[in-house]
Image (cartoon, helix red, strand yellow):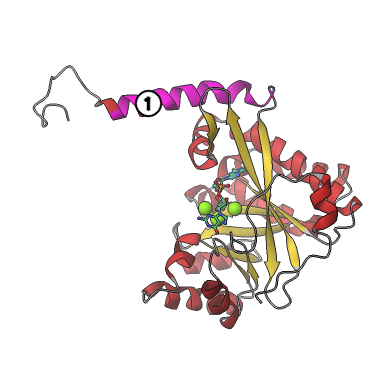
């Protein structure tokens, strides 16, 4: 690489690569003690039902304030945690913390809500995953049907018997499973039938462009129709504009999530009483 650029041959990385590598090393080193140092938090983003604007529930999204680097996006540190295996204990923390939040929400009168968490393929690989989930739900008195796992299309989902067994087991116990970031992975529509899912979440990259003259609108409309024919519900993520909301509504999308309706938020108990019975209206 450096040869081609005619640079000093001893330099294998350019400055930018070096900075990136250093950042990765610092992040990886920081991830190990982050759990015990209680540096993670969860933000909750509301999801609304389109027919009546009622609150469906929340998606829990992890947040990490690194002592030196500041706030680091999960899109940056989750892949590192997946790589080094730390996603398993981090994921268990997310599970317990989101269960605790859902339990306190119902104490504040926010009932029949669905809490969704993101689950990495590596977590599904762990032989104790399904037990861990069911145990956490039981401990907090949460009905399995109030809890949802968001999984991404991944080779592992299709090729691992452990992952498939865990998902089927959890589905049988009543836990919801949704396919996240739909349209970005393998997206073999045929595979949809073979996954134990009830719902798909259309990736925000499609929502972003669908109100422009582009193919995305046709794709989104098609995905919704197809999902419904397969007996699946549809959530659209990344809804930022009213125009997008209106098109999704016209196309019969079941649920919406995005900055238009509410950003991910770290709740205090005061918010919990305020959002009780809240509904979204476009007017
Ligand atoms: P995701 O599961 O697809 O989550 C949706 C992402 O879109 C979130 O980013 C959310 O803040 C963002 N978002 C929501 N509404 C809008 C909108 O209207 N416009 C735009 N531009 N963005 C919107 P976030 O919180 O940075 O999370 C990024 C990804 O990190 C997640 O994507 C998920 O794949 C992963 N992640 C987050 N928390 C966890 C976790 O606890 N465990 C695992 N395994 N992964 C997680
Ligand atoms: Mg998600
Ligand atoms: Mg997503
Ligand atoms: Mg995403």
Residue furthest toward the bottom?
A: 250
Vertical comparison of 178 with 92: above or below: below
Residue at 48% across, 68% down: 189
Residue furthest toward the front?
A: 283
Q: Tell me where residue 187 appears, x and y as whole percent.
A: 46, 63
Q: Which residue is mark 1?
A: 21
Q: Tell me where residue 209 appears, x and y as whole percent.
A: 42, 68
Q: Quadrant of residue 66?
A: top right
Q: Is residue 79 magenta?
A: no
**Label 1 CA crowd tier, 10 Å (few <14, some 14–19, many 20+):** few
Q: Tell me: 113 left or right of 7.
A: right
Q: Quadrant of residue 146?
A: bottom right
Query: 95 and 258: which one is in front?
Result: 258
Q: Is residue 128 visible?
A: no
Residue at 49% across, 33% down: 80
Q: Is residue 21 magenta?
A: yes
Residue at disc 1, CB closer than 8 Å to ligand 1: no
Residue at 79% across, 65% down: 278
In the rendered image, the quadrant that contains the C terminus is bottom right
Q: Tell me where residue 219 appears, x and y as whole percent.
A: 44, 74
Q: Which residues are magenta?
A: 16-37
């Amino acid at each position: 690489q450096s040869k081609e650029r005619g640079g000093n041959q001893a330099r294998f990385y350019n400055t930018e690569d070096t900075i990136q590598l250093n950042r990765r090393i610092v992040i990886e080193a920081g991830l190990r003690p982050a759990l015990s140092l209680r540096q993670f938090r969860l933000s909750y983003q509301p999801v609304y039902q389109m027919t009546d604007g009622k609150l469906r529930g929340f998606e829990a999204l992890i947040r990490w304030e690194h002592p030196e680097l500041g706030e680091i996006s999960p899109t940056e540190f989750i892949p590192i945690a997946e790589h080094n295996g730390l996603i398993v204990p981090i994921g268990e923390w997310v599970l317990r913390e989101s269960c605790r939040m859902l339990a306190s929400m119902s104490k504040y009168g926010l009932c029949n809500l669905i809490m969704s968490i993101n689950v990495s393929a590596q977590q599904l690989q762990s032989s104790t995953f399904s037990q861990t989930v069911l145990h956490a739900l039981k401990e907090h008195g949460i009905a399995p049907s109030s809890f949802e796992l968001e999984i991404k299309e991944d080779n592992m989902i299709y090729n691992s018997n452990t992952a498939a067994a865990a998902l089927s087991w959890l589905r049988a116990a009543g836990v919801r499973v949704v396919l996240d970031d739909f349209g970005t992975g393998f997206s073999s529509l045929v595979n949809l039938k073979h996954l134990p899912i009830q719902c798909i979440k259309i990736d925000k990259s499609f929502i972003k462009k669908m109100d422009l003259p582009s193919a995305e609108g046709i794709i989104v409309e098609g995905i919704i129709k197809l999902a419904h024919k397969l007996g699946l519900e549809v959530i659209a993520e990344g809804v930022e504009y009213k125009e997008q909301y209106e098109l999704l509504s016209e196309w019969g999308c079941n649920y919406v999530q995005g900055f238009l309706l509410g950003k991910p938020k770290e709740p205090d108990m005061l918010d919990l009483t305020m959002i009780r019975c809240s509904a979204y209206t476009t007017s």
